[in-house]
Amino acid sequence: MGQSERPVPGLGAIKAYPSEPAPRPRVRVLIAFALYAVLAFLYWGLPLLGHFGTRYVGVGTDPLNVFMWSLAWWPHAIVHGLNPLHLTGIWGNTPINMGWTTSIPFPSLILTPVTLAFGPVVSYNVLTLAAPTLTAFTTFLLAMEITNGAYWPSLAAGYLTGFSSYEIAETQSHPFLTLAFLIPLMVLVGVRVWRRYPERVGFGPKIALAGLLLAQFLTSTEIFTTVTLFGGLFVLIALLVVRDRRRMRPLLTTIELGYGIALVVLAPILVTLVGHAPFAIDPTTRAAYSTDLLNFVIPSTLNWTGPAFAAMSRLFSNGNLAEQTGYLGIFLLTLVTLSVVQRWKEPWVRAATYTLAAVVVATLGPVLHLDGRPLIPLPWTILSLYPILSFALPGRFMLYVALLTSLLIAVHLARTPRHGALAWGLLAAAIVALVPSIDNPSAWGTVRVPPFFTPAQIGRHLTPGETIFYFPFSRVGDGSFLQAESHFGFRLADGYLPPEAPAPWGELSLVEPLAYGLTPSDPLAARQLDAMLHLGAVQWVIGPRHPTSELRTLAAQSRLRYRGTAGGVSLWRVPRAIRGTPASPAALVLKTERRLYLTEAGILLRGTRRYVARGLPLRSLSPRMLARDHLVPKDFGWTAVWLSQPGWTIWDGWVGPFGQKDVAVGFEGPWSELEPVLARYGPDARRVFFPYPARFGATREAASATGILVLVFSPKSLPAPT
């Protein structure tokens, strides 16, 4: 046996590997890339023909306000000598640390020429179509390496990863997650280091791995974190399964030095992240955006067979199509099971299978869901307690399930003759089952830019550096995108990057309803809007050409001066009295919120006194009933049922029966804002709870608490509100 045919222990789908891989015909490689690119265009690009700058792949506001904005921001910041990691152009003058956001700096810089020449919409479409193409192609290259050039199995592996249900779902709005092409390249570096043994491994692979890690961090910190977690798990399992420790040393050294170099280069960015944690993801959200057990065999409506199962799939991942990533299908599951069973003697197959099993358990999340119903707790409950992992959504781990599954299948098919009808038949059926729906109109969005937001119009109406407040607000509007389209010709007193309003904006009660598309028009909302305009040092309020009656009422109550329409929008000038930056933003917010809760308490108690005086049943008492019976002001009543907490007001207030004979009012918020309510109405209350259900005790205990304040009254001795 010659040196080029010697057996290599451990790694391999076939019995022998050459010490150096045979050169691959470049034409076949280019054909593979072209095939993936054509498929991506057929699946997602056809509706863009003739509209590449006005339509985009995806839904919702994430593509507009996060990724198109980011694609424009990074070139703009660099060209104008700004620090791209330190942003003050959104949320007024509030500094935003871009390191914790999904602002895709690496792809943005690569696409700078496209963005500068054609705009962020074209760049976004290029990025969206390139993501599955590149992910499929790099998986193909990796599979070619580990199967010793088995072309058709490798081609299938690329498709199964690049056009997996994970990629199909995340293409809806998350290019930072679909750009997964760097992961197969990282693995490819490791495979080649392994195969070079016993030859000395130079510094090249370490630099290559460091570069890939840098690019991954600057594309998606979430994937950087999870690939570190699951890649480390795979290496640990391999140490136990392969048992060739001497052969593992060069690989471990490459990984250690690669990460070391990457972290040193990233140190300036990592330092800025310390003490600026991203918005929190609560345990309920992590559980909701986990993979439902049925989703493994039931597709979402994004697959061509999905509409037949729409009644079931709507329960997966909280009904969010962009997170319904779990579909593999019966054929693919059968094929990967067959592959593992027949190749179980291969140590690396066992290592990959053990890792796959661990990832599958992790993607099920902290609680096992079956058909949308929570059943039993799972191990991710414990792992998600770690600070970094607490921000990962488990359903997105299906990326690694798709990659490992496709590689295991490629390993099996490389050893299976083409006349092996069962395996190749299962593969064909699996590929057909995974085809996305190409006639789903909700998979594409349309850009509408009012003429006002062209650079020329902006310069005609606004002074450079002025701040606007834009309706619709934040996540339901497209203010951030319009800022990018205008070449950042104005500051914006809202934003969607990060998706949660930063302090002190997030402490104002009006922010949440506006972000959900509601425009309260009662006097409480007007005082809140005044605070927001003052907080952002806003000069102009801009809304649609035909504003809603609620917006017109709110603008009138805030004493905004209407200046007519221009370029397809309505303009209001902010009064000079609230136009300047407040001396203490925190003090302004605290004063506004205290006034809100105290006023709301008076409105609810006055309505409750009238309700009791009419002899209406206490068991039916609620904000909804007060509104129905016109016992609260008309403008206040329409907000009596709130999205996030049914039965509560939009201002986080509640009223209802307590026990058999009493009534209670409740308010949710921090103690510092609720304290005036207790001071005014607490002496008349029979019982006080804060934070509910705890009885109110010493002020010292409650001073730093946030929760629900509940005051219980006898119906006969309800206090007279001021």
Image: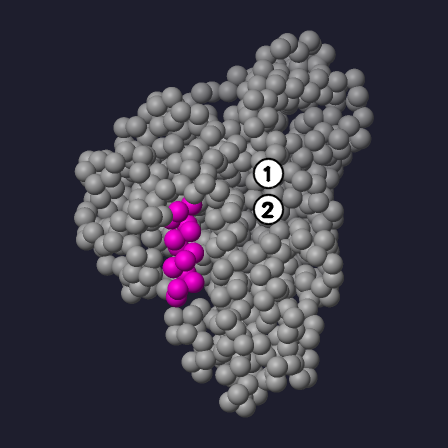
Q: Are discs 1 and 2 less than 8 Å apart at CB?
A: yes
Residue 443 or residue 658, whichever sits in front: 658
Please say whether residue 107 is one of the residues in the magenta stretch: no
Q: Position of residue 542 (x, y in %)?
A: 29, 50
Helix, strand or loop for disc 2? loop
| Residue in the picture at 61% in, 64% down | 679
Is residue 335 visible to us here? Answer: no
Helix, strand or loop for disc 1? loop
Residue underneath mark 2: 280
Considering every residue shown, the one lying at the far bottom of the view is 615
| Residue in the picture at 58% in, 36% down | 276
Quarter that holds the N terminus: top right
The CA span between labels 1 and 2 is 8 Å
| Residue in the picture at 36% in, 48% down | 578
**Amino acid type shown at disc 1:** Ala
- Above-or-below relation of 229 to 312: above
Span colored in magenta: 522-535
Is residue 636 visible to us here? Answer: yes
Q: Position of residue 561 (x, y in %)?
A: 25, 54
Q: Is residue 52 left or right of residue 684?
A: left
Please say whether residue 523 is one of the residues in the magenta stretch: yes
Q: Position of residue 342 (x, y in %)?
A: 71, 40
- Above-or-below relation of 480 to 697: above
Q: Position of residue 227 (x, y in %)?
A: 62, 34
Number of dots carrying numbers: 2
**Amino acid type shown at disc 2:** Ala
Residue 570 or residue 475, whichever sits in front: 570
Residue 61 or residue 165, whichever sits in front: 61
Q: Residues within 10 Å of mark 2 (few under 14, many from 20)?
A: few
| Residue in the picture at 50% in, 77% down | 606
Residue underneath mark 1: 277
**Secondary structure predominantly adopted by residues drawn in magenta:** helix
